[in-house]
Image (tube, helix red, strand yellow):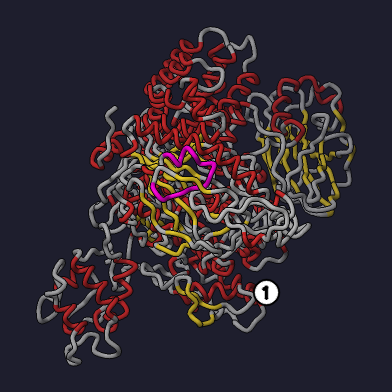
Amino acid sequence: MSLPTSIPNRRAFLKALSASSLAAAMSGAPRAFGEEPVMHPEATADCCILLWMAGGMAAPETFDPKTYLPFEKGLPVERILSTFPAIDTSLDGVKISSGLEEIAKLMDRATLIRSHVQPDLGSILHSRHQYHWHTGYVPPQTVAAPHIGAWMSRVLGPRNPVMPAFINIGQRLEGIGESEELKAFTTGGFFGSEFGPFNLPYPDEAARSVRPPEGMEAGRFTNRYKLYRKLVDGSPNREFMSDYQQESMLRSMENAHRLLGSKEKAAFDLSGESKETLAAYGEGRFGRGCLLARRLAEAGARFIEVTTEYIPFVHWDTHENGHVTAAALKREVDGPIARLIRDLEDRAMLDRTLVIIASEFSRDMMIEGVPGSEARDQARVKSDTLENMTHYGLHRHFTGGSSVVMFGGGMKKGHVHGATADERPLIAVKDPVSISDLHATIFTAMGISPKSVFDVEKRPFYATEDGKGRAVKSLFA
Amino acid sequence: MNVLKPALVFGIAASVANGAVDFAHEVVPVLREHCAKCHMEDKKKGGFSMNTRELLLEGSEDGVVVEPGKAEESLLLEAVMSDDKSDRMPPKGPRMPAADVDVLRRWIDEGMAWEPGFSFGEAAYEPPLKPRRPVLPPAVAGREHPVDRIVDRYFADHGIDRPAPLGDAAFIRRLTLDLTGLLPQPADIDAFVADRRPDKRARLIESTLGRNVDYAEHWLSFWNDLLRNDYQGTGYIDGGRRQMTRWLYRSLVDNKPYDQFARELLAPPDDESRGFIDGIQWRGRVNASQTREIQFSQSISQTFLGLNMKCASCHDSFVDRWKLDDAYGLAAIYAESPLEIARCDKPTGRMAEPKWIFPELGTVDGDAPRPQRLEQLAGLMTHPDNGRFTRTIVNRLWQRMMGRGIVHPVDAMDTEPWNEDLLDLLATRFVDEDYDLKKALAFIASSAIYQSESVVTEEGADLAVFRGPLAKRLTAEQFVDAVWTITGTAPGKVAAGVPREVDGPQDGLQAKWIWSASSASANIPAGEAVVLGKELFLPSKPVDVRAAFIADNAADIFVNGTRVAREDGEASAPIARSLTIGNFRAGKNSIVVVARNGGVDPNPAGFTFEAHLRHDDGELQVVATDDTWKWTSTLPDGNGRFARPPFDWQAAEVVTDPKVWTPFTAGLSDMMTVGGVPMVRASLVPADLLMRSLGRPNREQIVSMRPDNITTLEAIDLANGEALSGLLKQGAVNLARPGVPVPEMIDDIFMQALGRRASAEERALLQQGMGRRVTRTAVEDLLWLVLMMPEFQFVR
């Protein structure tokens, strides 16, 4: 499939297809700031897939293993740095944590950052750190900050005009804890909903999002729209509808029905995959999300996030029983991620697709709970020694050094950046990379200047905070 | 030349040079700090002004000072770097730090980018603070309304043709949606169109604004957006934020005067209205510009003054005159403990002093305790000379009614309105009418320009020039309310915190038909008038009163000496009329009805009335015509008052044979709605995915204007989203009654949704598409088709 990648093409598509984005600009906040022409860097990637380890993935249990000590009753907690042994990878001299055997085989294609750091926002709400990581701005903000996917959608648009540019897979936004906080950053922000996420919380049901409503066969759906067009054109009030806002609404309806009637919509449907492929990606929602991401990337989406899903105290939010939970999560993500990378490689897409594994912060071994305290446990009872298996694991939020893995998209193959201390505290001791700089790196790879700026309420709002993010040049191949 | 005028500059491209110096944040502070004394505003030493890029490039008396791209050759850089004290700039004080010099060097080398329209000089437009009474131009073509007199002059000056007057059916739809957020009922549309009275539009405006609950439940969304009030969201679970729904709901039902409304928000008399100034207590560490104190500063400035304190919350603003100390001055009024000023999140060591931003109105006593400071602030905000306060709100109302502000965006109140006289007229009149929001809306709605066809705008049209009303997109709540109304699918429950009760009278209407004699259903002389009366004692002033009546044939209804309704009986058959009554009070109340029989020969006469009074504590009281009412032949005066209490009050009689009115009474119970409780409105429930998708905001930030375009993602939700398709499916079950002819079904839905019947062409198209029989799927599709018409989705 030939896809538009360069900016002039993107412009042409935008102009042709989405005058409603112009309407968004006309209607209020966003506008470009200053009068300089666009000078974006040359892109090394056309598509970005963010694999989000929601809840705080402990680096020492995954991509930055430290001294391992097996569980032993009475062991002093302060001696434990990792609860898994390290394993060799395809990259000489670089080890990662056991449980990630499939990814280990691919580390010679990866760029591994071990010195990602976040500010400590009070170590409380995950959603605040996730907001920071996803928008580049620490909440609260006086205007609604756009998600990085919305920036890509706003500045680059979709690669294939039929496809939504920004797709968000695996995160439910209703019926779970902190859902309002999640919604606050899962958004186009001041860019408006045109640039916001197309949410697909259940990958297996994604096809329903682009299918006619339940119980309506395709023929009826198509006829309904045909009749609609005739009705609009024949309306005695047609002249009022020539208003640009109303025309833009009709264009949006056209775009929606074009997607819903397109061949690309097949990309949303996992049922066409072979048994072998489905098995390789696994039964879990994350695995299925990775498979869906691959299909959507093939069909021309610009930015896709797949999350293990944030739910307070669940998944990577291991406040107790961390070892067991981490082992289960690694089983859930290892195979699918590795398969995704291989699939992209087989399809010759990896070079132009930037895949990122990241999390809002890391974790450190510590038991800090007191009986009856609210933060649900922190392993139930504070203790300086391991007394039972639920104590064994990394439970404490830690922002001083976490790991990010990147594949493809112009990044180096088989490269390690930065390092954390070998002894507690496991802070980044070499080449720390802030969220701003990491975003600048991602944006630069995608061909977006980290200083891209829009004016909202008379103030400049930059792609990276204050336009200060600097791409880590040494990561690029 | 203007200080930044962003409203005029649009573009969709992300700009910015890679690695370029940021003019607003880096260059402006350097130039301002080191050069302002001699080369900015009205100062131009050596004939050199730096106010604009053009002036800077023009140079001094001695020639060129700087050229883009040539930093090292420039006199500017040479002067600031010079080691010779007599040449060095600035001439006094310490030399420019190397970092600042570097900023200038890079900026010059990169081409000296300048914010379009930016000037270091005075803004050409400084909004006046004091209220001003404009002189009205003479009326043109009999258009006496003050708004029209100004607009007519404006149109003449700009060579703009006045838009055509709006037809009746479109007017009732626009007005009802604008004031109550609801669609007009088909019967009301027909009755309004058929009404021949010359003042019917004025009557409609009055009666629509009289629907207190409908009004309140519509404007609740407007205020929730402006006050950051919601049913759920950040802060509510952990006590970091407080709902104001009860206070707000009642304030709107009561049409609380806006000055009092603002005072209760700024200096809360109790906990009910304090959520606005308290803002959101975020968990964990937040930026200094997001503390509760600074939120207070930003929120009161934006909501009440249309003024942006966000820049100045971190540093002196680069785009307007507000300074860091102004933002902190307001914050300190609220602060409970000493507040240190932070610049860009770094403590400065200086402490903030409580300070009001318009000293010409007065000051806040910094030594007074906090409640007093807030009282003083509330007094200054609502000071009669604070024209900014009134201009801001009337501009918001104008924007809601007309599609665009007189100042636009509505939160940029320091920019120039397209017509100062109009803004001032609305603002001064608003004060003259005691800050009555409904009267302000009525004033706009009664102008000929509001009652004009909406202007069709083209892409890229210059909207800063006023041409007439613009079509407005339905808000998320309006859309959902309309769908619920048409399909009968509204939920049963409101969110916790809404002071609206769901229990209504259980067994239908209680009202009886009464007259002076029980035989009235047979033959009462034409023109006979009787006066019906009822005294009632109320434990408290009801928070909401909905009522409906039918008179055979005419009636004037007075409550406590004020007329609340008039039916002139000109219609060919008795018609049910609804009204809301706002002047019941605690204690004794009187209802007086002057009822007249119509016709030529003796004919049936009767009157039936029912009112549902909702009390503060949720108690519902029903007042209905029955044999406890009295009658007299003594006529009251024009206000329903008796010079002397009539001595001949007798018991009214329930008419023995009310069947003659059966065909007309159905309308009465419809008006009082099932169970006496109106439909649950979208504004009263937490946002669902559909509303969110259609633009109901997450209320962590103040929102003063909703998005006005419908995006592709929204269109996908509308085309196949589960929420809407579920409602339509249920709606089809409710509506698809067997035996209803297809054309009737089509007209019915058209009338409800669009306020008009289908054209022959439309009917033919739809009938062809739907087939002959009314099936559920056909109704479902019909509903979707009509709801997706831009004609439906926009208020025009």
Q: Residue furthest bottom?
A: B86
SS at mark 1 in the image: helix
Residue B219 visible in this rendered orientation of the protein? no
Residue B35 visible in this rendered orientation of the protein? yes
Q: In this image, A249 relative to A421: left or right?
A: left
Tell me the quarter of the picture where residue B727 sits: top right
Kindly identify the amino acid type of the residue bearing the numbered disc 1. Pro
Tell me the quarter of the picture where residue B420 sits: bottom left
* Foreground of the two, A57 or A223: A57
Graded by Cα atoms within 10 Å as few (under 14), some (14 to 19) or many (20 or more), the crowding at tag 1 reads: some
Q: Is residue B762 above or below residue A313?
A: above
Which residue bears the numbered disc 1? B371
Q: Quadrant of the C terminus of chain B?
A: top left
The magenta-colored residue range is A92-105
* Foreground of the two, B543 or B289: B289
Residue B708's spot in the image, x, y percent? Answer: 44, 43
Tell me the quarter of the picture where residue A240 sits: top left
- Magenta stretch: residue A104 in it? yes
* Foreground of the two, A39 or A169: A169
Q: Mark 1 falls within which chain?
A: B
Residue B112's spot in the image, x, y percent? Answer: 21, 66
- Magenta stretch: residue B675 in it? no
Q: In this image, B106 relative to B224: left or right?
A: left
